[in-house]
Image: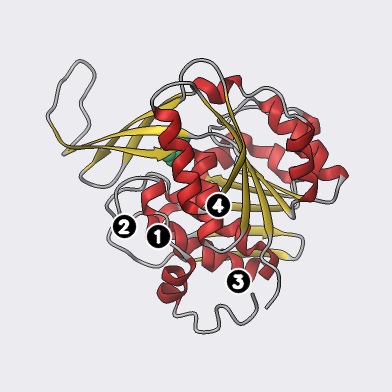
Amino acid sequence: MTQPPKVAVLGSINMDLVCTTERRPEPGETVLGTGFAMVPGGKGANQAIAARRSDAEVEFLGAVGRDPFAAQLRQVLTDAGVGGARLRSLPGSSGVATIVVERSGENTIIVTPGANARFTELDADDLRVVADADILLCQLEIPVETVAAAARRARAHGTLVLLNPSPVRELPAELWRDIDVAVVNSGEAERLGAALAAVPHVITTRGGAGADYRGPDGVAQFPAPRVRVVDTTGAGDAFTGALAAAWHRGPERALPWACAAGALAATELGASASIPDAAAIARLLGDAAHGSDR
Ligand code: RIB
């Protein structure tokens, strides 16, 4: 049994306010919803929980506000077994995502960043966590400067940098130079275009169609298992967190693992609530060998 990989996740944590409805309203229209749930989310927290449920050792670096959501957001990390000692409490509100899920499972999301946007500085303990990790996993729901500072530290200490550049935006050239692995959806791939060419490993997720991989040894396509879709919110995060946890097994094994995690996450409502554990992923893959090399 080898040591589980150490993953430092730097990113957002939000309270997701989820409304289900038959269909989204048109501009100016009001429709009745069919249900409501408050579920902790945020791309950073979702990916941290996904990596943990795929058996990585995970530390989360992020920020909550000083409001009634903060305690619940802390608790979800604790319950998942994610290290939350580097979760700071900043004045003002926590991040909130307003999510509308249609009957088809498709969603629209408005993120109000709150404390995530005020997470502008890494202290010496944060930087030590990054340097000690095997993988630094980041997204773009916190300031790019914070991500760039962590990536710089990671690169200097041989920590692999995995970036999910979502929500997509322009990135400074020096940050691109520090990225080892990028996980993008097809819209992000199109938007980032040539900038991705310099990244050694690029994974493009294609929802129910699986994922494409491009790396130093060539390209490959990985199908996603077919599932009954209830809510796609957080499916990409489940994919990315599981990928980070399995990356040490190589793309040929990590990609099917991540595709299965993403597929399972789409079968239930709520981002963090729907993230599968390693046993469920292995079952879906019929991966009897899972565990033998961990
Ligand atoms: O990727 C899904 C996540 O995006 C949600 O949990 C929401 O909080 C937003 O960050």
Q: Amino acid at mark 1?
A: Ala
Q: Amino acid at mark 3?
A: Arg
Where does label 3 land, which residue? 253
Which residue sits at x=20%, y=45%? 103
Image coordinates of residue 240 in percent, x first then y, are: 55, 52
Q: Gap between marks 3 and 2, in whole Å?
A: 22 Å
Quarter of the view holding residue 147:
top right
Image coordinates of residue 205 in percent, x first then y, are: 51, 52
Q: Do labels 3 and 1 touch, CB within 8 Å?
A: no
Q: Gap between marks 1 and 4, in whole Å?
A: 12 Å
Q: Considering only order in the chain, which callout, 4 or 3, is on the residue closer to the N terminus? A: 4
Where does label 2 land, which residue? 267
Q: Do labels 2 and 1 touch, CB within 8 Å?
A: yes
Which residue sits at x=65%, y=27%? 170
Where does label 1 land, which residue? 263
Which residue sits at x=63%, y=57%? 57
- Determine the secondary structure under disc 3: helix
Write down which quadrant ligand 1 falls in: top left
- Determine the secondary structure under disc 2: loop
Where does label 4 land, which residue? 240
Quarter of the view holding residue 16:
top left
Q: Gap between marks 3 and 4, in whole Å?
A: 14 Å
Which residue sits at x=66%, y=65%? 4
Q: Gap between marks 2 and 4, in whole Å?
A: 17 Å
Q: Considering only order in the chain, which callout, 4 or 2, is on the residue closer to the N terminus? A: 4
